Image (tube, coloured by chain):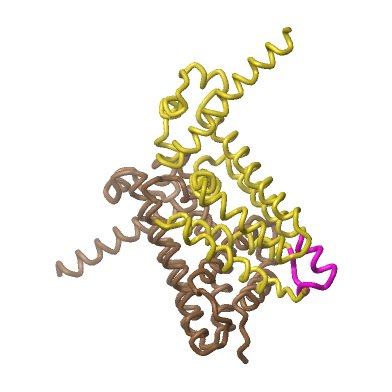
Chain colours: A yellow, B brown
Amino acid sequence: MPYRSSDKTRQKKDAKRTAMMQAAVRVFAEKGYYAATIRDIVSAADVAIGTFYFYFPDKETLFTYLYEETADFLLQTLRQAVAGRSTLPHQVSAGVRAYVNIAVFEPAVVQLLLVGGVGALPALESQRLRFRERLTAIWQKPLDAAMDRSLIAAQNTRHTAEAIAGACDEVILNLINLPDAEREAEAVVNDLVEFILRAVAYHGS
Amino acid sequence: MPYRSSDKTRQKKDAKRTAMMQAAVRVFAEKGYYAATIRDIVSAADVAIGTFYFYFPDKETLFTYLYEETADFLLQTLRQAVAGRSTLPHQVSAGVRAYVNIAVFEPAVVQLLLVGGVGALPALESQRLRFRERLTAIWQKPLDAAMDRSLIAAQNTRHTAEAIAGACDEVILNLINLPDAEREAEAVVNDLVEFILRAVAYHGS
C-alpha cells in the first residue's frame, strides 16, 4: 500500500521536524539567537545534523519558521479562548487566562515572541508587526461588538486593543521572571482582567 | 594654563564620543544591530576608526553604553514630566505626552529600547529588565500617592503600573510606524490618557 507507506514516511519526517522545532524554542530561550548553534539544536533534538539541512537551509530560516508557527499557536489559542465566550467580561477573562497559562507553562514561547525574537533578525520585523496586528485584532473584535451594543464607553477601539495587547505582554513578561510564577498567575489574571474591564469602561450586566 | 587646556581636550573628546553615540543610534535603527558595522558608525559620525577604539573596545560595548544612556534619557524625561504636575490626570497626561514626543521626534530612541536592542545581545537582558523596572516605578509612584488619598480604586499598583508601561509602548510603537505619526500624535496622547485614567478608576476632581 504505497499511500500508507508514504504517509508513514511523512509522519516520521514531520516528527523529526517537530522535534527540531521544539528543541530550537528551548535552545533559543536558553542561549539567545546568536549564541545558539545548529549543533546545539540537533543535539537537543537528538537528530543527525544532515536531518537539519534536509528541512532548513540555515539557522535564520529555521528561526523565521519558528517565530511564525509559535505566533500562530499563541494567536489560535487566544482566538479560541475568546470566541468560546459571549460576554465581554468572559471574553477578556478567557483571553487573559489563556495567555497567562501559555506564559507560565511554556515561557520559552512567550520569550521567543516578545523578547528573544525581537530585534534578532532585521528580516523578522515585518513578521513581528504582523503578529502584533493579529494580536490587536483578537482584542478589537469583542470591543467593537460591545461598543455596538453600548456596553463600553465610546472609544477608539483600535488604540484600546493595542493598549490591552501591550499591557498583557508587560505584566506577563514580569510574571514569568518571578521564581513562583505559577503561584502568582491567578492574581495576575484577576488584576489584568479588572484593569482591562475598567479601561474599556464596561458597564454591562 | 594646563587645567583649561586639559579641560578643552576633554570637551573635544566628549564631543567625538557624543557624535559616535548619536550616529550609532541612527545606524542601529536603520540596519539593525548585527548588520551595522563599526565602519558604518565612524563613517556616519565622521570620525576616524581609531577614535572609535579609543572609546570602545568593540561594537557590543558601545551598544550596551548606548542602551543604558538612551534608557536614562527617556526615563529622566518621563520622570521630570510627571514630577512637574500635582494631580494624577496632569501627571498621566504629561508622562504620556513626553513619551509620545520622544517617539515621534526621535523614533530611533524608542526603536532601540523597545525593538532593536531587545534580544540583540543576551547580555542586554538584565539591562532591559532594569529599564522596565525603572519605567514601572515612574508610573507606580503617582498611583500609590493617588490610592493613599482614595482617588483611584483599590488595586495592585505594581501590576497596574506594569500594564500602563506596556500599553504605552505598544500604542507608541504602532504610532511611529504610521506615515503621518506627527499628525496622529495628539489623538494617541488623548486616547492613551483616557485609557489610563479609566483603567485606574480615577474619580478625583
Q: Quadrant of the N terminus of chain B?
A: bottom left
Residue A19 vs A86, above or below: the answer is: above
Against B15, residue A24 (above or below) is: above
Residue range of the region highlighted in magenta in the rendering: A142-157
- In the rendered view, does B155 fall on the left or right side of A10? left
Q: Residue A161 in the image: x percent, y percent? A: 69, 62
B20 up-or-down from B172: above or below: above
Identify which residue is drawn at 46% across, 18% down. A48
At a point 64% along the width and 42% down the height, the residue shown is A73
The residue lying toward the viewer, choosing from B137 and B69, is B137
Identify the residue at the far bottom of this view.
B205
Res A13 quadrant in image: top right
Closest to the observer, A24 or B80:
A24
When asked about the image quadrant of residue A56, the answer is top right
> Which residue is at 31% across, 60% downward?
B14
Q: Residue B125 in the image: state x and y as whole percent.
A: 40, 51
Q: Which x, y percent locates residue A3?
A: 74, 12
Residue A178 percent across, percent down from the top left: 42, 58
Q: Residue furthest top?
A: A1
Image height of B70 relative to B84, above or below: above
For the C terminus of chain B, which image quadrant?
Answer: bottom right
Task: Report the front residue among B85 and A37.
Answer: A37
Q: Is residue B100 left or right of residue A45?
A: right
Query: Does A121 lie within the magenta span?
Result: no
Give yes or no for residue A144 being in the magenta stretch.
yes
Number of numbered discs on residues? 0
Residue that lies at the very extreme toward the left in this rendered image? B2
Q: Residue at x 73, y 73 (%)?
A: A202
